[in-house]
Structures are given as structure tokens and as C-alpha cells.
Image (cartoon, rainbow, N blue to C red):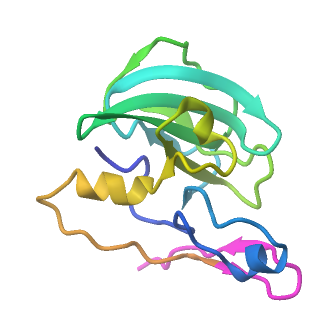
Amino acid sequence: MIHPLAGRVSAHYGELSDFRRKRGMQPHSGTDYPAKRGTPFRAVGSGTIKLVQFSKVLGWVTVQTVWYDKKTYYVGYCHQDNKPDLKIGQKVNEGEVIGKVGNTGMSSGPHLHMTFSRKLKGVFGVTADKVDGWKLIEASRPTEKKTAPKKLSVTCPNCGEIYYAKPKSN
């Protein structure tokens, strides 16, 4: 499997930021990849499109299946820029562009929120069926160096708003 976007991660699965803690929220349920609105992202693995829908919280969502380690996983790609041009039942290949980063739903800035679950509906909400997709992708790539990307976001201590840092240009 591959990461849907190269390099940067602003929030990892299971993190409990001060913003979430102060509001009695659950730990983060996915992996956030910040990028400019409209940036294309890729399918993490080959599989089948199972769902394309709009959610008040997650915005435009695509769910696809992937097969890894003799198990089926459901991958949710959330906050997409617009309704993806994909059909339920459509086959997609690892690395194929399947959507664009957006800021739909309850989102503090353009990013791709990726969730992994053992059940289709597990993509939505906090469930015991979710798994750490970033770690799963890394585990599927044994020959590559595994280093966690640097976190590029800051949470305002006063209002809890999350601000995404711009990468330094050389």
C-alpha cells in the first residue's frame, strides 16, 4: 500500500490534542494529510469503491476496500473538494488518482482525512472497528525506511482552532 499524499501529516490516529481534550472529544479517528485545496490524492491500494456520499461532519467521502494481510479493510477518504467522479462497484488501482483534497464538512482547513476500518460503517464516527491506517500502510512497506512525518499544525490555546503550517521553501 501507499500513502494517498506524499510526506506531511498534521494529525495521527489516536492523538488526543488539547483542543479535543478540553471539549471532551474522543481521540482522532484517522490520519490527516494537509494540502492545498484541489490537490489530487491516490488510492492507497487496489480495491473496489463501496460508497460515495456527503456527510455533515466528513464532507464528501469515498470508501474503498483494500485487502492486506488476509483481511479486508475499508478506507475512507474525507473532506474532498467536491463529489468524486466514482461509481459504487468501480475497481481502482493502487496509486490511481481518485479525488481532490478539500475542506467540506466540519473541517478547519484543506486536508485529506483518511480512516481505516474493518467495517464499512466504521469509517464514520468513533468505533472499535477503526485501525491506524498510517501504521498499516507503513507495515505493508517492509523495504522502505519508516519514519513518522513531522506534524505541521498548531492548535490555538485560546479558541482551539487548528492552523496548518506552510512547509519551508528552500
| Residue in view at x 44 percent, y 77 percent | 150
Up/down of 91 relative to 12, above or below: above
- Relative to 153, is 26 on the left or the right? right
Up/down of 31 relative to 89, above or below: below
Q: Position of residue 57 (x, y in %)?
A: 79, 45
In the picture, which quadrant includes the N terminus? top left
In the image shown, does 33 or 52 lie closer to the viewer? 52
Total tally of numbered discs in the picture: 0
In the displayed orientation, state which residue is furthest to the bottom.
Answer: 157
Q: Is 100 one of the magenta-colored residues?
A: no
Residue 96 in sight here: no
> Where does the magenta region start and end?
154-170
In the displayed orientation, state which residue is furthest to the front.
Answer: 128
Residue 144 in sight here: yes
| Residue in view at x 53 percent, y 48 percent | 114
Q: Position of residue 138 (x, y in %)?
A: 29, 58
| Residue in view at x 70 percent, y 32 percent | 82
